[in-house]
Amino acid sequence: MSIKNNIAKYRQNLPAGVTLIAVSKTQPIERILEAYEAGHRVFGENKAQELQLKYETLPKDIQWHMIGHLQTNKVKYIAPFVQLIHSVDSLKLLLEINKQAQKVSRVIPCLLQLHIAEEETKFGFSQEEVTNLINSEDFKQLSNIKISGLMGMATFTDNQDQVRKEFRTLKIFFDSLKNISLPSTVSMEELSMGMSGDYEIALEEGSTMIRIGTAIFGERNNY
């Protein structure tokens, strides 16, 4: 299967209103261009400097999403152009995104990452931490960020019931936030959950963004 055919297959089967993010991390420019020439415009990267390099090299109508863990000292590399940061997991990071966004006169859309997996290696807030964050005085001072929704990564397991339970927990919390009065800089529009191995369950549980790498580009180049 070619990259073009892989993208077409996903596009045909995705529900209306769901965004396909082609995860291009570690993929060479020519393979990303194959996807671009097939009409795809939304790509996800997990390293800020690699993302910056690809932004500078590739066509400017690409929407770049930061989907990996983002260190505060790397925000400056992507602040001028990033479309959406999925992986906001601390107030410290939000403060830095706001600072760098001010420097380039932008409001940067972000998702708050929740820790929904049983694995300790995953980053993210707890539900209580999110509630406390968006009601805090520190948060209310941030005028150059917009929280557009939530993101979560399920446990890497063959137990589909567990994966479903984790995604469902995130969707229930997402819906509960939708139904309360939120600060003007917060809206629950996007729910980013689901990757190549579990996206079908994520879609059934209400995901609006799926992050697909291997199933589009083939096995990753590890460098």
Image (cartoon, rainbow, N blue to C red):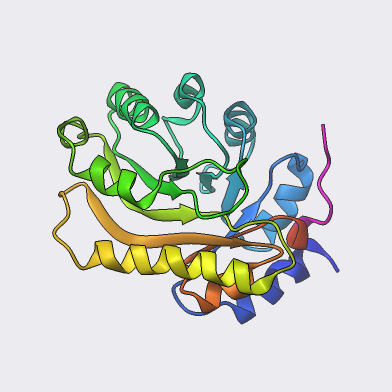
Q: Residue at x 44, y 66 (%)?
A: 169
Viewer-closest of 51 and 138? 138
Q: Position of residue 96 (x, y in %)?
A: 36, 24
- Is residue 80 depicted above or below 73 in this figure? below
Q: Position of residue 102 (x, y in %)?
A: 27, 25
Q: Position of residue 103 (x, y in %)?
A: 31, 21
Tag count = 0
Which range is magenta? 217-223
Give the image quarter of residue 159.
bottom right
Residue 60 in the figure: left or right of residue 33: left
Viewer-closest of 186 and 172? 172
Residue 132 in magenta stretch: no
Which of the image's four quarters has the C terminus? top right
- Is residue 45 depicted above or below 149 in this figure? above
Q: Residue at x 51, y 66 (%)?
A: 167
Residue 222 in magenta stretch: yes
Which of the image's four quarters has the N terminus? bottom right
Q: Position of residue 183 (x, y in %)?
A: 16, 49
Give the image quarter of residue 41.
bottom right
Give the image quarter of residue 56.
top right
